[in-house]
Amino acid sequence: MNTVAANTLPTPLPATHFELLGGEAGVVQLVNAFYRHMDTRPDTGDIRAMHAPDLASTKAVLVLYLCEWLGGPEDYSAQRGHPRLRMRHGGFSIGMAERDAWLACMRAALDDVGAAPALQGALMNAFFKTADWMRNTGPNPTPISTTPKESS
C-alpha cells in the first residue's frame, strides 16, 4: 500500500461565491435587500421606473440569474437560455447614473446581508464590469454588438 497516497487528504475545492453568500437563501436575501434599496433610495427613481410595480417575477428571475452567476445551480440557463443581458435590457436607457445607482443598491444589499469584505470586494468588481458593460447612453457607452457573443 502506498502510505503517502493513503495519508493524503484531498484538497477541498474553494467555496464558490454562491456558497460564501449562503446558497440560494443568501441570494434571496440579497435580492430582497437590493430591491428594498431600489425602492427607497432617492437616486434610484430612473432604474426603479424600468421595472413593473410588482417586483415578484423580477426578483425571481434575478435570484435564478445570480445563483448561477455566483457558481450555484444552472437553473437560469436551463429555464431561460443564455442571459443575453444587453439584449434583454436594450430597451432601457442605461447611462452612468443608472449604472451607479444599481451598483449603490447592490453594495448596500451586500452590506445588509453581512457579506464578508473580501467577498463584497470581489463581487462589486465583477458587478461593476457587468453594469458598465450594460451602458448604452452617455459618454463612451459600450457599443451593442450585432454578433451573438454576450458576456455573462
Image: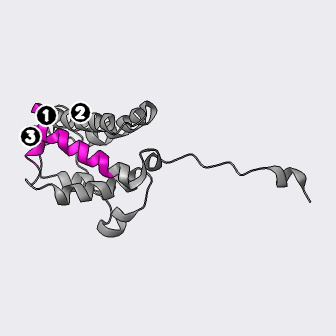
Q: CA distance from mark 1 to mark 3?
A: 11 Å
Identify the residue position indicated by label 3 in the image: 46
Judged left or right of residue 10, residue 86 is: left
Q: In the image, residue 89 lies at what x, y percent? A: 18, 52
Residue 41 disc label = 1
Judged left or right of residue 47, residue 145 is: right
| 37 part of magenta stretch | yes
- Residue 63 visible here: yes
Dot 1 or dot 2: first in sequence order is 1
Looking at the picture, does residue 117 appear above or below residue 77? above
Q: CA distance from mark 3 to mark 2?
A: 14 Å
| 7 part of magenta stretch | no
Image quadrant in which you'd find residue 37: top left
Q: Badge 3: few (under 14), some or many (20 or more) residues near its Cα, within 10 Å?
A: some
Q: Amino acid at mark 1?
A: Arg
Q: In the image, residue 138 lies at what x, y percent? A: 14, 34
Q: Which is more toward the observer, 120 or 151? A: 120
Dot 3 or dot 2: first in sequence order is 3
Q: Which is more toward the observer, 122 or 145? A: 122
Image quadrant in which you'd find residue 100: top left
Q: How many marks?
A: 3
* Prevailing secondary structure of the magenta residues: helix
Q: Which residues are magenta?
A: 28-50
Q: Are marks 1 and 2 in contact (CB under 8 Å)?
A: yes
Question: Between tags 3 and 2, which lies in front?
Answer: 2
Question: Between tags 1 and 3, which lies in front?
Answer: 1
Q: Amino acid at mark 2?
A: Ala
